[in-house]
Amino acid sequence: MEIDADAPHSMGTTIIGVTYNGGVVLGADSRTSTGVYVANRASDKITQLTDNVYVCRSGSAADSQIVSDYVRYFLHQHTIQLGQPATVKVAANLVRLLAYNNKNMLQTGLIVGGWDKYEGGKIYGIPLGGTIIEQPFAIGGSGSSYLYGFFDQAWKEGMTKDEAEQLVVKAVSLAIARDGASGGVVRTVIINSEGVTRNFYPGDKLPLWYEELEPQFSLLDIPSSPGPEPMNI
């Protein structure tokens, strides 16, 4: 079977940002795909921009990484000049500026989320083309197609931190079940006035959905047979 290396690759993912009463929760799967090939099954798609602002990356890994690197550098300079941390709105607008000015060359959709002392927890969606939209929740990537109706039903105003994180984990696991380009583990980042908390949910701990089977005979299973006996000399 011949593979055309110059053919366009489908780049899938699932990224989510949700506000709750006191902060935000960001979540993502961990599969980086190159067409039908899984290039990395445990990648981290939630990238730190400042101490209080993170970005979820989808689309081209290279494009989203270079945008994140530039924005992190600019925000570092901004913090030094002002003597205080950048707000979520400033960070999101820097991402928007780079995405819009280079929209003909970039293939990336981003979700910026964080907390600051002026406006609290905020989520901004920056899809392909560089539009910026402030939303109570944002979803992106190929897996988002399966989640719009779910969020219409499940999201509610004034959720607690635990409710928001459970919603994000449940939504990403649903996208993993339905979207072939999403998979691996689920990572979440919780940002509030107390700081940042990162959580990790391995694939065998995620809820199973309709027609999904329990994992069996995995190469990751620890063999039950005892190890070899030490050699007597």
Image (spheres, grey):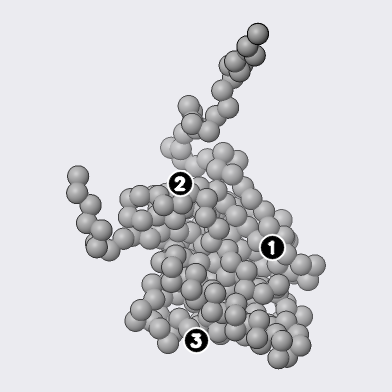
**Which residue is denoted by mark 3 in the rendering?**
97
**Residue sitting at the far left:** 2
Q: Position of residue 213 (x, y in %)?
A: 46, 34
Q: Nearer the viewer, residue 141 or 147?
A: 141
On the question of residue 38 being in view, the answer is: yes
**Tag 3 secondary structure:** helix
Q: Identify which residue is drawn at 61% across, 63% down.
A: 26
Say left or right for 54 vs 5.
right
**Residue sitting at the far bottom:** 81
Which amino acid is tagged 3? Leu
Disc 3 from disc 1: Cα separation: 26 Å
- Dot placed on the residue nearer the N-terminal end, 3 or 1: 3
Q: Identify which residue is drawn at 60% across, 41% down.
A: 205
**Which residue is denoted by mark 2 in the rendering?**
177
**Which residue is denoted by mark 1 in the rendering?**
190
Q: Position of residue 50 (x, y in %)?
A: 67, 74
Say left or right for 66 vs 46.
left
Q: Identify which residue is drawn at 49% across, 69% down.
A: 65
